[in-house]
Image: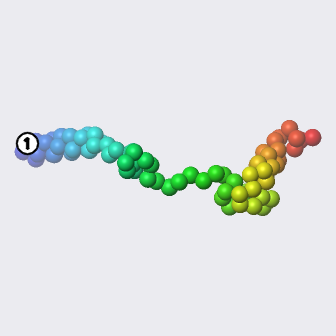
Amino acid sequence: MRIARFASALACAAVVALGTAGCGEKPQDAPMKSGKYQGKPDNRPWEGDALAYGTNEFKRGDKTGWETALKTRAQAQNEYTRAQ
C-alpha cells in the first residue's frame, strides 16, 4: 500500500513538472539596439551568386539577367509548353 501511494505521488509530481515545463516561452524578437534591427542585412536577389538550379546566365549585380534567368526557369517548368 505504501509503495502504491509513493508511485502515485511520484506520477502526479511528474505530470505537474512536465505540464508546467511548457509554460515558459522565451521571447523570439529580433535583436534591436536603439530602435534599429541589428541582424544580417538583406541583399537584393540579383546581388548574390548565380542560381544553383539554372545556368550561369547572369553575373552578380545584373538585374535584367537575373530576371531573364528566372523567367527561363519558370517557362521550363510550365507543363503546357513542355507537352506541346
> Tag count in the figure?
1
Q: Residue furthest top?
A: 80
Q: Residue at x 79, y 53 (%)?
A: 65
Q: Nearer the viewer, residue 79 or 66?
A: 66
Q: Nearer the viewer, residue 53 or 18?
A: 53
Q: Position of residue 38 (x, y in %)?
A: 44, 53
The answer to whether 26 appears left or right of 14 in the picture is right
| Quadrant the C terminus occupies | top right
Amino acid type, callout 1:
Met
Q: Position of residue 48 (x, y in %)?
A: 66, 58
Q: Residues within 10 Å of mark 1 (few under 14, many from 20)?
A: few
Q: Residue furthest front?
A: 34
The answer to whether 25 appears left or right of 9 in the picture is right
- Check the image and tell me how it is coloured: rainbow
Q: Position of residue 37 (x, y in %)?
A: 44, 49
Q: Residue at x 69, y 54 (%)?
A: 46
Q: Residue at x 46, y 53 (%)?
A: 39
The answer to whether 42 appears left or right of 27 in the picture is right
Instruction: Write down the residue under mark 1.
Output: 1
| Quadrant the N terminus occupies | top left
